[in-house]
Every structure is written in structure tokens, then in C-alpha cells.
Image (cartoon, rainbow, N blue to C red):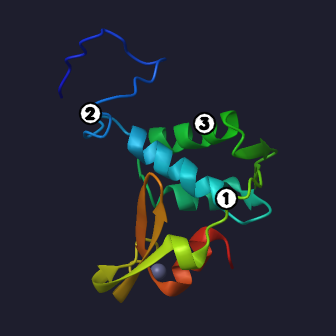
Amino acid sequence: MNARRPNGRVGGTLILGAHVHSRVPDDAADVELALTLLAHLEHGELSVKAVMDRIEMITTAPETQRRILDRAVERGIVTREDGRIEPVSSGTYVNFQQDVIVKTGEFSCRRCGASLSSGHFVNFDDGELGPFGSTCIRKVLGRE
Ligand SMILES: [Zn+2]
């Protein structure tokens, strides 16, 4: 791991500028992508398990999964009460025409593992999530 930190500043302060997009050494990118996904869910209410099913598509590390959920609550993306998760509507629903990209090729669905001849990807500002089959992507986004 590249441990050089010229400013000696770790955590707390987000330093914007050069090289922010070089490979993040920890799971910060996964956390951000998962938070973006949660912010786009169209469900009214979900069980913790259903939310975890979605987070698992991004990371299988239990510590990261817990941190994603904690951070989603902290940031007001979801509310959590008695084991139920409710996404806070913020008008960030995915527009299927604009935000879902279909690519042709050989893929396997990230959700169910089915082989696909075309993969659907959700195009978020901070990353792509996919591939999914046409049914699974609707489930991921909460259309069904
Ligand atoms: Zn699938």
C-alpha cells in the first residue's frame, strides 16, 4: 500500500485536488457506490435483509456492509427503525432512459448469476453498477 501522506492528514478532512481518482486503497469507493444505490431506491420500506441483499451486490465484506448502512443513516439517505429501512425520498430516482446503459456482450448477472447476451448497467455519477439482466435491474432499483 502506498502510505505516503505528504500532509500527514488522515481522515476527517477530504482533500480535493490532484490524484483523488487514483485507486482508493480501502473500500471508500464501494461505500460511496452503495450509498448512491441506496439513494436511488424506489421502495417505500424495506427490511434490513432486503437492503443487505442490495449492498451485497457491491461488497461481500461484512464490515463494509455495516459501515454502508450506518453511513446511509448518518447521511439521512435512509431511516432505520425497528429493523425496517425506509429510503428518504430525495428525487434521485433513476431515469431509465438516461441512466441505464445496455451493453452487448457476454455477461453474467451480478444479482442472480444468469448468463446474459446484453448487460444492463446503472450509470451513477461515481461509478457503474452491473451487469444485470432486464428483470434483475428492475428489482435492484425497486421497480418490482
Ligand atoms: Zn439476474
- Locate the N terminus and report the quarter of the image it occupies: top left
Q: Within 10 Å of the Cα at label 3, are there few (<14), some (14-19), or many (20+) other Cα atoms?
A: some
- At which x and y percent is residue 46? 73, 60
Residue 2 visible in this rendered orientation of the protein: yes
Q: Looking at the picture, which amino acid does disc 1 mark? A: Thr
Q: What residue occupies the far front of the structure in this picture?
A: 17
Query: Residue at label 3?
Result: 71
Q: Which residue is mark 1?
A: 92
Q: Position of residue 21 (x, y in %)?
A: 30, 40
Q: Quadrant of residue 53?
A: bottom right
Q: Which residue is mark 2?
A: 19
Residue 97 quadrant: bottom right
Residue at 40%, 44% in the rendered image: 29
Q: CA distance from mark 2 to mark 3?
A: 24 Å
Residue drawn at point x = 55 percent, y = 61 percent: 54
Which element type, helix, strand or loop, lies under badge 3?
helix
Q: Secondary structure at mark 1?
A: loop
Residue 95 in the image, given as x and y percentages of width and height: 61, 72
